Amino acid sequence: MTDDVSNLLARIADALDRLAPPPGTPADFSTARLYRYDSAAQAFIPAPDYALALDLLVGVERQKARVVENLSRFARGLPYNHVLLWGSRGAGKSSLAKAAFMALAADHPGLRMVELDRDDVAALPALFERLRGRAEQFVVLCDDLSFEEGAAAAKALKSALEGGVGGPPANVLFLATSNRRHLMPRGHDEARGLISVAEDAEEEVSVSDRFGLWIGFPPMDQAAYLAAVATYAERFGLVTPDLERRALQWSQLRGARSGRVAWQFIRDLAGEMGVGLPV
């Protein structure tokens, strides 16, 4: 009977080994400054440098200064805060995060950025542990973060930012962008009951408290939009006498004014003029 039990346990152990996820690919951060994290393969995939220069982002000077200052403190080993960039669509939140990182990385060779898909937030605690104690410093970016799946992802993020008994890793700064200040999903499933909905809402709202730095991006007014267009046009030598009129027509067709819309207009104009631009 003992042999039968031993054989059964051995077979169970073999089956569990086969079901277990493969070990993560050994992390090598020497080939790039930007990486995308593949949570399924537990691998860091190198990405090309972000091409848009920080000084091309106009109309967000206050936000730019706060992000750069916080990143600079992190890069210099000074106290820093995790960052939530929230606000209107197309305001330049993700662009600012990447452009500010590139500006700081030029003077801090050990700085790296790892981008995590918002659907993989549950992988954050394990990711933070993989980065803990390494010689490099990591900005972990999660773009367009929200908790559409409820409180489970929120708990994973809180766990990562709090770090358990060992505390959060000192060499990791988490930076998230969101269209909503409190990272709330657009709606809750009423069938789950008011109590469950309220508990999930409390869990999700409490996550935003873990970010020490909240930076808002209000909608762009016409003056700021035209300033962004003019800055891009001057930088890339796009000269046309009716620049403002065409830029306003473009924004009216899009039904919005934002840094993204300004850049899309400039790309269209540059294509028309046969001028190359950064991707």
Image (tube, grey):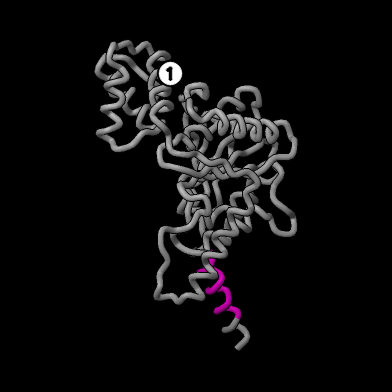
In the displayed structure, 78 sits above or below 165; it is above
Along the viewing direction, whichever of 85 and 230 lies nearer the viewer? 230
Q: Is residue 23 left or right of residue 185?
A: right
Taking depth in this image into account, of 169 and 32 the one nearest to the observer is 169
Q: Quadrant of the N terminus?
A: bottom right
> Which residue sits at x=28%, y=24%?
268
Residue 221, image x, y percentages: 41, 32
Residue in the foreground of this view, choosing between 160 and 193: 193
Above or below, 204 against 231 in this view is below
Q: Is residue 160 magenta?
A: no
- In the image, what residue type sits under mark 1? Thr
Image coordinates of residue 110 in percent, x first then y, are 65, 30
Quarter containing the C terminus? top left
Q: Which residue is mark 1?
A: 231
Is residue 186 toward the left or the right of residue 15 in the image? left
Magenta span? 6-17
Residue 100's place in the image compared with 276, above or below, is: below
* Among the 4 quarters of the image, the one containing residue 136: top right
- Report if residue 10 lies within the magenta region: yes
Q: Can residue 67 be seen in the rendering of this structure?
A: yes
Pinpoint residue 275: horizontal percent, then vertical percent.
31, 14
Give the residue displayed 55% in from the left and 28% down from the top. 61
Q: Residue at x 32, y 20 (%)?
A: 244
Q: Is residue 257 above or below residue 236?
A: below
Q: Main secondary structure of the magenta part?
A: helix
Question: Can residue 37 be seen in this snapshot?
Answer: no
